[in-house]
Image (cartoon, grey):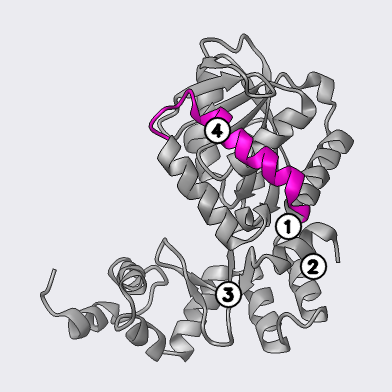
Amino acid sequence: MSDIMSYLFKTNAIRFCEENKPFWYTSGKIGPYFINTHFVYGDEKQAKELLDFIDEALSDKFTLPKKVFEKVLKQYQENEIYHQVIESMKSYILENINVSEIDYVSGGERRDWFFSNMIAYLLKKPHISIYKDLSTVVSDYNFEKTETLQDLNHAKVLHVADLVTVASSYIRAWIPAIKNLGGTMRWSCVVVDRMQGGKEKMEAEGVKAYSLVNVDNTLFETAFSNGIINENQLDMLKKFFKNPDETMKQFLIDHPEFIENALHSDEKTVKRAKLLVENNLYGLRNLGTVLCANFGDRP
C-alpha cells in the first residue's frame, strides 16, 4: 500500500460506508465513500481547527496568506503524516514537471491552501491566493510580503489542490482567475482525484492534470486486502465506480426504506434527502408522494 493511500486510511480522509448505509452527499445524491482529503493535515480535529482559523482570517485578504502559511509550516515541521504527504507531493511534481517553467504556484479558497502554500515555499515560487469571488493576492515564496496582483504577463502557473471531482471550481473560478490576469494555468496537482471527469475537463482547458492517488478499483481492492472493507462493500464500490447513478438508483429500489428513514433523521440528512426527492435525482417513480407523506404542505 502506498504511503499516501495509507495516510488517507489512517486519518479517515477516505471513509467507506457500512453495508446498506451509503453516505448522503451535499448535492442530495448518495454514495458508498466520503473523502475529506484535508484530514491528512494530521487528523480531523487539526484539519477542522485550520479551516476555522482560515474562516476567521478571511476578513483581511492581505494578512491571511502569511497567517495560514505560519500554521502549515509549523504543522509540516511537527506532524509526520502531513510532512510526508507534502514531501511526496513535492517529489511527484519534481518528477513530472520541469519546475524551471513554473512561474507561480496557486491555490484556491480554502482547502487548497493546506497544500499549495507549502509547495510554493518548498519550490521557492511566489504563491497566488485565489478567493471564491475570483479576487487574488500574490505572496513571495516565504509569505513575508503579500500584495495585489495586477498582471501575470503570460506567466505559467501550477495550481495545487486537495481534491478534484468534476473540476467545477477549476472551471468556475481558478482557471478564469488566472486567465483574467493574463496568465496561463498550465498544470494542476492534487492529492486525490475522484476520477469523475475532472481531469478530462481540465485538460480540455489546456491544464495538465496530476494526482497522487486515484479513487478507483485499485484503491478499493487495497482497502479490501487490508481488512478495511468486506467483500460486499467492495462489490458496491466497484459497481459505483463503473456507474454511480445506476448503482445508487438500484440501491434505492432495493431499499425503499432508506429515503423514508432519512426524512426522519437529523436536520442535515433531511435537507439532503429532500433535495433527492424534490429533484428526483435518480429518476425514480412516485418520489413526490414520499415527500408529501412525510411533510405535507409544510415549508
Residue at numbered disc 2? 218
Describe the element under mark 1 as helix, strand or loop. strand
Q: Residue at x 70, y 62 (%)?
A: 215
Q: Main secondary structure of the magenta part?
A: helix
Q: Is residue 75 magenta?
A: yes
Q: Quadrant of residue 158?
A: top right
The span from disc 2 to disc 4 (Cα, nearest Å) is 38 Å
Q: Is 35 positioned to the left or the right of 101 in the image?
A: left
User: Three-letter amino acid code at disc 1?
Assistant: Asn
* Mark earlier in primary sequence (2, 3): 3
Q: Residue at x 77, y 48 (%)?
A: 83
Q: Which mark is residue 214?
A: 1
Q: Is residue 203 visible?
A: no
Q: Which mark is residue 95?
A: none
Q: Is 136 positioned to the left or the right of 93 in the image?
A: left
Q: Position of residue 295 (x, y in %)?
A: 18, 79
Q: Residue at x 56, y 45 (%)?
A: 111
Q: Position of residue 166 (x, y in %)?
A: 56, 50
Q: Quadrant of residue 13?
A: bottom right
